Image (cartoon, rainbow, N blue to C red):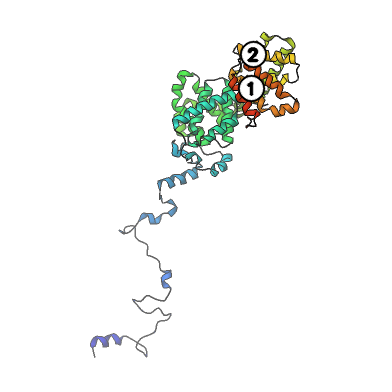
Amino acid sequence: GDPAQRLDRAGLKGKRGWTKKKGGGHGKFTWGRPGDETFMTEPELSRYDPNYDSLDDEDESNVIFDVLEYHQQMARKAGISLDGFQGGGHLFGAPPAPPQAAAAQRSVPLADSLPAKIPLKDFKAKCMELVDEFLTSEDTEELKDDLTAMHSPMLHYEFVRRAITLAMERSARERELVSELLSKLYGARVLSSEQCGKGFERLFEVVEDLQLDIPAAKRYISQFLARAVADEILPPSFLSDPLIERLGGEVIDHAKVLLSIKHGLVRLDNVWGTTSAASVDDLKQEIKMLLQEFINSSDIDEACECIKRLGVPHFHHEIIKRAVVLSLDFSEREQAMMSSLLAELGKREIISDKQVEIGFRRLYAALQDLELDVPGASKILEVFINQAAKDNCLPAQTVEAIKKRYLNGAKSAPTTN
């Protein structure tokens, strides 16, 4: 036969011409046993192989698939929330959310980033109007409802800026009111920590211009800022952020000093002086004693001077309310005396028409409770408000509007004691 064929068979042994391998793996150049492919591994490529890829040696969790995803990962590790920064502001200069507010913020993570429902220009004008009205009425609930109704949370930083700017132009009492307002709105989740921080950033940017009209602007802003940290609206780390430190400069330094002094957090409750809730109660008591003294002495000039010396024009609505409430237990002669005092206060421009209106609105809002204590209180109140209109303390249309709102079952304003 063929010599090549004979040579190939010569090396084979066994009765049948070749030896059967153990395990059924067959010989060379075969696939092996069934299932062997499961345990096959790719040989490691040399670092010098053209097909070598350095990313194969790294942990997959370190691969950056998307810039935004990477920023979110880094923010989570640093305890920083990126919510609300789509509308502007720096990425990592934001303060981390306070622990007690973290859960609340997680429930509405995109609230601050929702598109504004009204233009920025209109929002600014409305904020000025709301804050100005609040500083007169001190009605936090009404302001909260009006601010929420604008459905523009991503612009709330502008509200913070406008509120503080307006308060700086007023007295210490108004500045205290705005500090308390920011704390209450933050607690009610109307304002976020990010939006408050951004509002202060905007103030830092214009502080030099503000000083032209308000020489103490830097000091006021630092006091507002320190108070915001003390009230846990902003975390202390906000003051140590490098970008914030560069932007705020002296304001940040002064705020740190206020927070670092002994018992600083406690003292910041009175950063604007003795204008706390306790002093308001004292003021109410002083007004009550002043009015009772007037009834005893009948000295209208002395009463007007005492009211003027109180120096609280924003709180004159309490005089209107307290005068009528006290008169419910008086005789008709004493009621006429009290009505004449209110007329004289209006004539001398000690009490504004707006304060008179707020005072009567508060009285009508509390009318049901007054009727329980003094049956017939509604008739006495009607005599007072009609006389106020005759004395030109209230416009006739305002009187009708008040009666229509509160006597026809309309929504009552919150009662202030």
Q: Is residue 362 above or below residue 306?
A: below
Instruction: Give x and y (percent) for residue 69.
Output: 44, 47
Q: Quadrant of the N terminus?
A: bottom left
Q: Is residue 230 visible?
A: no
Instruction: Depth check: give the residue in front, 294 or 195.
Output: 294
Instruction: Depth check: give the residue in front, 61 or 143.
Output: 143
Q: Is residue 131 visible?
A: yes
* Residue at 68%, 23% in the rendered image: 281
Residue ID for mark 2: 343
Instruction: Give x and y (percent) for residue 107.
Output: 55, 44
Q: Which mark is residue 359?
A: 1
* Residue at 64%, 22% in the rendered image: 360
**Disc 1, SS:** helix
Give the residue type that dot 1 points to. Answer: Gly
Instruction: Depth check: give the residue in front, 254 or 395.
Output: 395
Residue count near mark 2 (Cα–Cα under 10 Å), binned few <14, some 14–19, many ≥20: many
Which mark lies nearer to you, 1 or 2? 2
Q: Which mark is residue 378?
A: none
In the displayed structure image, the side of residue 178 where residue 61 appears, left or right: left
Instruction: Give x and y (percent) for residue 361.
Output: 63, 25
Q: Quadrant of the C terminus?
A: top right
In the displayed structure image, the side of residue 210 where residue 26 appears, left or right: left
Q: Quadrant of residue 205?
A: top left
Instruction: Depth check: give the residue in front, 54 or 182.
Output: 182
Give the residue type that dot 2 points to. Answer: Ala
Instruction: Give x and y (percent) for residue 328.
Output: 73, 21
* Residue at 37%, 88% in the rendered image: 14
**Disc 2, SS:** helix
* Residue at 71%, 29% in the rendered image: 369
